[in-house]
Amino acid sequence: MLLEDQNTERKSLRKVLGKGADWDGLARICVSFANGSGGHLLIGIEDGEALPPVGQQLPPDLMNRIRRRIAELTVNVQVLPSSQQATNGGEYIELAVPHSPNVASTSDGRYFLRIADTSVPVVGDDVLRLANERPGFSWEAMDAAVDRRLVDKGKLIGFIEGIRLSDRVKDSVREKNSDELLDHYGLANGSTLTRLGVLLLGTTADRRALGTAPLVQAIKYDDQGQKVNKWVWDDSTLSPLELVDAIWYTLPDFRESYEVAEGLYRRQVPAYDEKVVRELVVNALVHRPYTQQGDIYVNLFPDRLEVVNPGRLPMGVTPHNILHASRRRNEGLARVFHDLNLMEREGSGFDLMYDRLLSQGRPAPIAEEGPDWVKVTVQRRILKLEVLQLIAEADERFQLSQRERITLGVLAQTEGMTARELATALETGTAEQLETWLGRLVDSGLVQTVGKTSGKRYFVSPTHLRNSRLDTMTTLSRISPHRLRALVLEDLKRYPDSSSSEINRRIGAEISPRTLRRALEALVSEATVTYTGDRRWRRYRLGVQAGV
């Protein structure tokens, strides 16, 4: 039985029966599914339960009633109810809501979108964004008025060979001839190419005539932020399929590496992981809005790589849920990239980047969104070389899943994290959803815990830290609570009436401000430290209980 997620929700049978029926709430959920990628409502299963009540029977006319009421309360929403019987004999309704090609709304003009496991209202300017991103006829499928015989022969041959060598397509697809493949992937319609067909297989002149074919600028900066080199792909000679290789093989920085000592041996670690770079470029090409002009920028700094894409994130995706949310802006383009092994399956691209970067001792990628751009930054610098050994040894011994490697990598770069902090780092939303990410880490002893409920804290086993020599890296960022307390008291003894930022600067800027605030709050609660003022004007001094 499916649990609640972005595409599944459970509702009690009471929501569609009698005076307690909540038809408006049901309509809102259906609208949010229709505006997203579709979904299923399991009616007759209580929250927190996996099965309906034993012996539960459905009224014979209920499905027709649901179909009629949702049709009355929504616009552009189709529902397909069906009766199901669970293993315990109880009956429930599975209400399938397909993705709507047009914008769906309630009959009173309200719009909703599914984000994670919640139906969120869409208001203000976002309504226009939703309409622009959900045209009745997609940009990819529009007729380009170019004869299908006028494709670039070299690009067509490369495309066909890639499909026939791919392990991601069925045998029936590999056996299609060139014309059948063009129709199968929506690259042609009748006697002419679609805009997607011109974008991928058209001639340079036809691709340039589209007006929104991707243009890429790669710029290298020095320590002072001055441009020192530049590479440009702005003549529309290459299709998006070819741009990925061109960017990777052209920029020399992508072939630089570090030499890491591992006992008597040395290991080469790339300055930038090839899979991460390719995934960044593919995301920029596949998820950009092709109804909007603008260059893609690949910015190389001494310490980081930035990929900047025109347009905003698809509706429902934010920098805070990008690790979990999945929205395809260009379905046909994404399908071609996937089948040619140029991108990960839907929704797993950022998982791969998190996995690769954290396993190499680097920070996780950072996504930012502006008014008309999206930027993803990855660091060149390896924060902790020892994390490489820790993840490699743990993976070899326990065959970790991708989520387990990501979670272990996050924890290995810190002194430990509370359940809430870890949930924030993994973008799970709530601490209760951490279980799927922790997997076997706690049971295997790789990760240990202290405390309970909201105060529960997770940290990598000291034994594994010691084996990987991570325990030798104790710095002020990994300071114990007792040591931090002593430092604060000594500082206030010398400098009374200090702000928290002043204390932080003097005892060690690498100490997290949040960690210092918790220490100060604990000292204030026991009257060892007192303060005057509030917020930014708060000043601390030793109290009577400090014995000074």
Image (cartoon, rainbow, N blue to C red):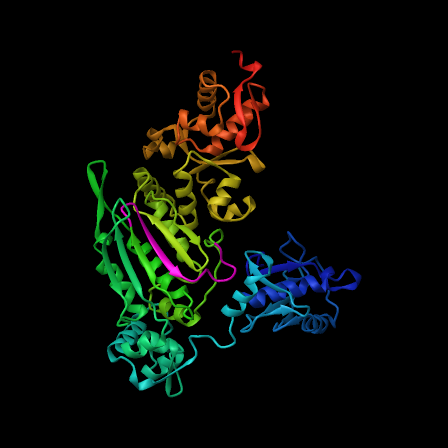
Let me know if residue 316 is in the magenta part.
Answer: yes
The front one of 336 and 249 is: 249
Q: In this picture, is 46 found above or below 425?
A: below
Residue 194 to residue 530: above or below:
below
Residue 165: image x %, image y %? 29, 71
Can you see residue 333? Answer: yes
Q: Relative to residue 416, is residue 242 depicted above or below? A: below
Residue sticking out furthest to the top: 548
Q: For residue 292, what is the image quadrant?
A: bottom left
Q: Residue at x 62, y 66 (%)?
A: 30
Indicate the quadrant where residue 39 lies.
Answer: bottom right
Q: Main secondary structure of the magenta part?
A: loop
Quadrant where the N terminus is found in the figure: bottom right
Q: Is residue 38 visible?
A: no
Where is residue 217 shown, x and y percent of the image? 29, 61
Q: Where does the image place residue 37, in percent across and percent down from the top left? A: 52, 66
**Foreground residue among 516 and 181:** 516
The answer to whether residue 197 is magenta is no
Where's residue 462, x and y in %? 40, 31
Q: Nearer the viewer, residue 434 or 44?
A: 434
**88 over 76 or under it: above or below:** above
The magenta stretch spans which residues? 301-318
**Residue at (37% x, 44% y) in the render:** 363
Given the current orientation, which residue lies at the most extreme right position?
A: 19
Where residue 308 sits, quadrant-wise, is bottom left
